[in-house]
Structures are given as structure tokens and as C-alpha cells.
Amino acid sequence: MDILKEIEEALVRRSIDEVKALTQKALDQKIPPEEILNKGLIKGLDIIGKLYESQEIFVPELMMAGMAMKEALSLLKPYLERSDVPPVGKMVIGTVAGDVHDVGKNIVSMVFTGSGFQVTDLGLDVPAERFVDAVEKERPDVLALSCLYTPTRLAMKDVIHLLKERNLRDKVKIIIGGAPIDQNFADLIGADGYAPDPPSGVKKVMGWLGK
Amino acid sequence: MKEDKVYQERRARINELRAKNERMTCRERAMMAVRHEEPDRVPIDNWMVPEIRKRTMDYFGCETYDELLDFLGVDFRNNYGPSYVGQTFRKYPDGTVEDLWGVKRKTVVYGKGTSHEGTFSEVAESPLEKMKTVEEIEKYDHWASADWWDYSKLKAECAAYHPQYCVINVGDRLDRTAQLKPIMYLRGIQQTFIDLAMNPKIIEAIRDHIISYFVEYNHRVFKAAEGEIDIFMMGDDMGGQNGPLLSLEAWRRFFKKGFKTYIDIAHQYGIPVMYHTCGDVYKLIPDFIECGLDILQSLQPRATNMDIKRLKQEFGKDLAFQGGMDIQQVLPLGKPEDVRAMVKYAMDSAKKGGGYIICTAHNIQVDTPIENVVALFEAYHEFGKY
């Protein structure tokens, strides 16, 4: 079987050791790292996303796949850097002020990193100023905001407000997520979009970036 | 209760509906519903964060929370269990405090300086998170013990609410009878998910300590209460917004046996069991029923697959329900007429034949306008009548 197909399937099985070994094998066979990423790993991640969406796999399995991606990427990274391949996109992510829940945000961060994004994770309980400073400094394509409680979701609005004040709103796309978030709330506060789970978030952002 | 005209007017609608509808005590009403019989009206339970309690008390002119519950027609009173008499919880200079399991907790403030400011107690540090082996887990020296509680006042505390109210033994939010939740506190949420996929022996080791504690503790609680507890409530979140947190197979492997054990103990004492879980747990419900669960609590309406109409149709014969009111969109963001429509829908869907206790799917949160809280309770009384 084609080794890229093998990588894809090992990722779908969430077998960290196999994904790692096969990625190394593919590198040894001089397969270009961006091909390993795009035609092996990301294809596998696509399938993982569909399985998660259809409730065939759940959070533990999604995290395993994320960890397998991370391991594979750590092997690819030196090559990708050397070959001057730009990241798929740049993202700044964090859990908004007043909210100390970061499990969902960490999974999102992991899955985006796994999909070839350069992710700057600001952590949890992040004040609006820090998000806006990071947007100014890092110039990301996407700002991702997370929360768990309904009261803390109002802090997302503050971030968007401050971005406008500092004339940065049109410089960055905003995606929001978390248990109390839906498209309606995204529209209400003027975010560009919402995603119910990490894989569909990747899909949405890829769409924005025309990838 | 304040008797100024403004408060009397605000209370008039609920008072009028209650006078018209109510024909029995809260306890009779609640227990009929649990037995799948139709009482005079649908029983009402109440979950509010402290800030909303305060705001609602102020609005209706109630001077204590008990006065508010009485006025609103809330049929249940919570019993928080025995009194803690174990070692003093250790406090640290950074403001964190150890809990029953040795988990460090801190108080978190959100919405600072706004009208929706509030606080929550959150895990600051999970003591088992870095451990690699079952042996290390076994050496942990802070497993909770049923000996750390004084059960002697429990019976009198519950009996004080009788015969008027229905007493739910709820425990405390942070150490309610559960399995997965204390594992997450002790081990960290992220590590727990990884363990569920990769280190089943570690999950089992922690879980077994937790189960043996709650088995002994609950036996003592029920024995001490001598029939004064009407409903036993346990709570363990197994659902996320869009599906269970773990697969049915994983739930069966790790948690089904303990779930049934907890239910069996309460049933030995003749106490029906209510189980709280957030989120979409649709796929697990047949197993809950098989384990003997009496009442499923929360029915988070914005979670997938938790539409109350469908749940009633599919499982209403075997299972009673508590909850169904949306705190994620309708209460904080909707208008009073949306709140009314939501109550009507739930009542129309679930009240037939008993087996329904109306309540919000979790605490009413601080971002909820007072007019929606008022609309909620007025609609409970308007649409709850049999």
C-alpha cells in the first residue's frame, strides 16, 4: 500500500506509534514533507473529523488523533522549516477573560497545529487587551476565542469591540467556539464564524483562507 | 416578605395562579410525579446561581431564599448531606484550598466590574495528574473517607422540611456522588480523556477508590436519614453539547457497574434516584434505564438529541425527567415571550401521565435578565396545571 495511505489509516486508527514510525519511513523514502502532511496526515484528520461529527468517535479518541498528529509534525517540522514551506495559516487562540476552561481550546489548538497552522496559544482567562495586542504583533489570519459559561461569552464581544477601536477588526478573521456558542451568537457579536467542533473549525478556516 | 405595594403587585400573578391550581403538598405532588402519576400541577425545581437568587429575591421583595422558594412554589428542598468533621482543609498562600480529595481549588471571578459579575470555585491543581503508574496512584494518601462526616443531624435536617416539601439529598456540586467527575478533579480533565483512551488501568484504579468511598458514605447517609430523604441525587457529566463525552462502549466498560451500584444502594433504602448530567447522553439512556434509574436530570435542550418531546415519547414510560429549560440561549438572550413558548413546549411534551419535574437545565446564570426569570416562573404556573 502507498505509504501516505498507510499514514492516513494509522491516524484514523489513532495509533500514535504507527503514525510516528510511518511518517519517519516516508521521510526516509524522501517523500516531500508537505506531501506527507497534506496527502497523508490531513486526509486522515478529515476522516477523524467526520467520525467525530457522526458520533462514531468521541473526545478521548479525538485527543489521541491530535496527539498522533503532534508527534508526526514534530518529525516533519525541521524539514518543513528548511523547505521554506509557509504554514497553512497563522492563528492566535485563547479562552476569554473570566473563564478558566481550556480543555476544548487545547484540543482546537492541537488539531489546528496538526493541520499545519502556526498557532499562538495565549492560554486561559485572557483579557481583551492581550488578544488585541497579539493580533497587532503576530498579524494572524485567524483569531480563535473559546469559552464555557454563558456569562463569560460576553467577554468575546469585548475583544471584538476593542479590535474595532484599534482599527484591527478588518485585519483578522474571528472564529468562536465553546459549549454556549452557536452561529446565532457569532452573528450577534459580529464574529466571522462559529464551529461546533475542532475538525469543522479547520474546514471553515481553510475555506476562509481559500485552501 | 416585604409588603410594599410594588412587591405585592409583582407577586400577584404567581399567587393568583397558585391559589387556583394547587390542591396538595409539595411532597405529595413531587412524589406522584416521580411515580408517573398526574398531580395537581407539574412540580417545580429551582437551580440559580447566588447572584440570580439575590436579584430575584430583591425583585419580589423576599428577605430570605426560603421565602423566595416558598413564594415561587418550588416543591423541592435540598439536603446537602452530613456535616464535615474531618481534618481542616489545607489553605495555601496563593489562595487555593484543598478539598475532600486533596484537590486544590481556587475561586474565579468572571465579568469583573460588570452587571454579570460572579464567581465559581474551580480546580487549580490535580494531585494525580503527573503520576505514571497504578502503583503511584495507590500510594496517594488523600483518598476521602466516610469517617470524616458526622451523620447525626441529617435526619432532623431532612425531617424539618416534612411533611410539606420533597427533600432531595443533593450533596455538594463539587463532591456529589459520581465517578468520572472526581477522576477529572484528581487527574485533570485532559489527562483523564487521554487515560480513557490509553491508560484504562489508571482510570480503573482511581475509579475504584472513588466508588468504595461513595458506597460507604451513601450507606451511612441513607441509614442515618431513616426514611426522611425523598430523592437521592447523583451527578456526573457524561454529555457534551454535541454528543456524549465518551463512547457507549467506554461508558459500559468504565462506569456502568458503579452507576448501577449507586442506584442499588438508594433503592435498598426505598429511595428513588435522580441523575444529573449535562449535555447529549441520548445514546446512554437505555443503559441508564436498565440500571434502574428513576429520574434523568437536566435535559439540556440545546444539546443535540435532547429534545424533551422525543425523550418523553421514547423513554417516558420507564424514566421520569427533571429539567428542559434552556439557560444557554433562551433565558439569557431571549425575550419573555420566548421563555413562555419554551415552558409551554416542555409542558405540552412531557407533563402527560406525570413523570416530569420542570426546572432549568442548570443554574440560571447571571447574564439572565430578571424579566425572563419572572416570565419563567409565571409560565411554570400557567402551563403546569393538569
Image (cartoon, coloured by chain):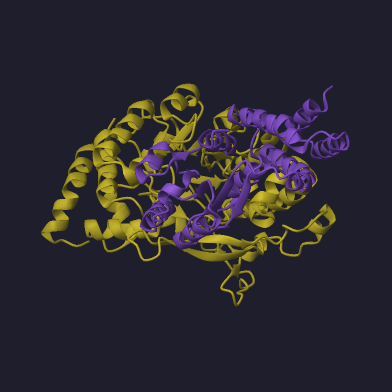
Chain colours: A purple, B yellow
**B87 or A191: nearer the eye?**
A191
Residue at the extreme bottom of the image, as rendered: B93
Where is residue A147? Give x, y as percent: 49, 50
Q: Is residue B36 above or below residue B55?
A: above
Quadrant position of residue A192: top left
Q: Nearer the viewer, residue B89 or A147?
A: A147
- The answer to whether any part of residue B25 appears in the image is no
Residue B274 relative to residue B327: left or right = right
Q: Is A19 on the left or on the right of B115, as rendered?
A: right
Q: Is residue B371 left or right of residue A175?
A: left
| Residue at image point 74% right, 33% down | A35
User: What residue is shown at x 36% (from left), y 29% (from top)?
Assistant: B351
**Can you give x and y, in whole percent of width and height, for residue B328 in the image?**
41, 43
Say if B147 sits above or below B215 in the image.
below
Q: Residue furthest front?
A: A84
Residue shown at 17%/57% (left/top)? B7
Residue A57 image point, x, y percent: 66, 32
Residue with the most extreme left position: B5
Q: Quadrant of the N terminus of chain A?
A: top right
Can the viewer see residue B329 in this picture?
yes
- Total count of labels: 0
Give the image location of residue B47, x and y in percent. Answer: 40, 50
Q: Quadrant of residue A205?
A: top right
* Nearer-the-camera pick, B92 or B50: B92
Q: Quadrant of the C terminus of chain A?
A: top right
